[in-house]
Amino acid sequence: MGRGKIVIRRIDDTTSRQVTFSKRRNGLLKKAKELGILCDAEVGVIIYSSTNKLYDFSTTSMKSIIERYNKSKEEHHQLANSSSEFWQREAAMLRQQLQNLQENHRQMMGEELSGLSVKELQTMETQLEMSLRGVRMKKDQMLVDEIQELSQKGNLLHQENVELVNLTRQENMELCKKGFGTRDPNGAKRNGFLSNNLSLVEDLHAPVELQLCQPQQSNHETPTRATKLG
């Protein structure tokens, strides 16, 4: 079984703390030495105990390692300062550009025009006319596109209506054939009635002409019969 997880906190017992310090210190120095040999690294370790006792290890001279560390830290600090100055200049330039754009926008809206000369006003007027022309061209193009789209939709709807009317006529003809295309008792088809019916269906909207006729008088004559007496 492995050891339990050790809680990393200050050891209260003085003896246990001294034993742990000795073990961990030796392990740390051993690891530092192995790191310097295996990886060809320049390693320097400085340890002060709780009793202010010094323990150190370095692969080369501790003084040269400290000087190299201070030099690297100074260079890093200078680089950070130069980077900070660069970003400060960039931020100031962006703020100036934003201020110029806001001022230009206000002038385009007709505000703060008191400090402009006639030539500057003419230049601004030309820019506004060009912008207005571009906006109008874009608007006209969008309207033309919408009109074409609506025209295409109208053509599609008209074609669908025509197909629907043709289909309705075909169904009506089939219904008429089923209803009036039977045979009479003599075996002959009543096609004449069918054709008349179709013509009647097709001429439903034709005007109807009516005429009044005078009633004819009927002569009812009773033939005289001779009576034969016996």
Image: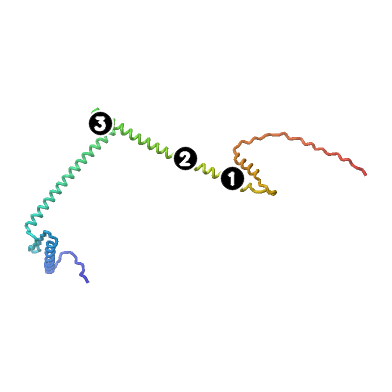
Query: Does the CB distance between marks 1 and 2 fall below 8 Å?
Result: no
From what the image shows, is residue 190 above or below residue 218? below
Packing grade of label 2 (10 A; few <14, some 14-19, many >=20) is: few
The three-letter amino acid code for the residue at tag 2 is Asn
Q: Position of residue 4 (x, y in %)?
A: 21, 69
Q: Quadrant of the N terminus?
A: bottom left
Separation of disc 1 and disc 3 at Cα? 80 Å
First reached walking from the N terminus: tag 1 or tag 3: 3
* Disc 1: which residue: 173
- Of helix, strand and loop, which one carries label 2? helix
SS for callout 3: loop
Residue 22 in percent (x, y) is at 11, 67
Left or right: residue 175 versus residue 27 is: right
Taking the spot 14% from the left edge, 60% from the top edge, the residue there is 39
| Furthest residue toward top | 118
Label 3 sits on what residue type? Answer: Leu
Label 1 crowd (10 A; few <14 / some 14-19 / many >=20): some
Residue placed most toward the observer, 9 or 155: 155
- Residue receiving disc 3: 113
The C terminus - image quarter:
top right
Q: Quadrant of residue 144?
A: top left
Q: 133 or 182: which is nearer to us? A: 182
Q: Amino acid at mark 1?
A: Met
Q: Nearer the viewer, mark 1 or mark 3?
A: 1
What residue is shown with label 2? 155
Which residue sits at x=18%, y=64%? 8
Who's the residue at 17% across and 42% down the image?
A: 89
Instruction: Say which of 107 and 127 sits in front.
Output: 127
Give the CA distance from mark 2 to mark 3: 54 Å
Classify 105 as above or below 88.
above
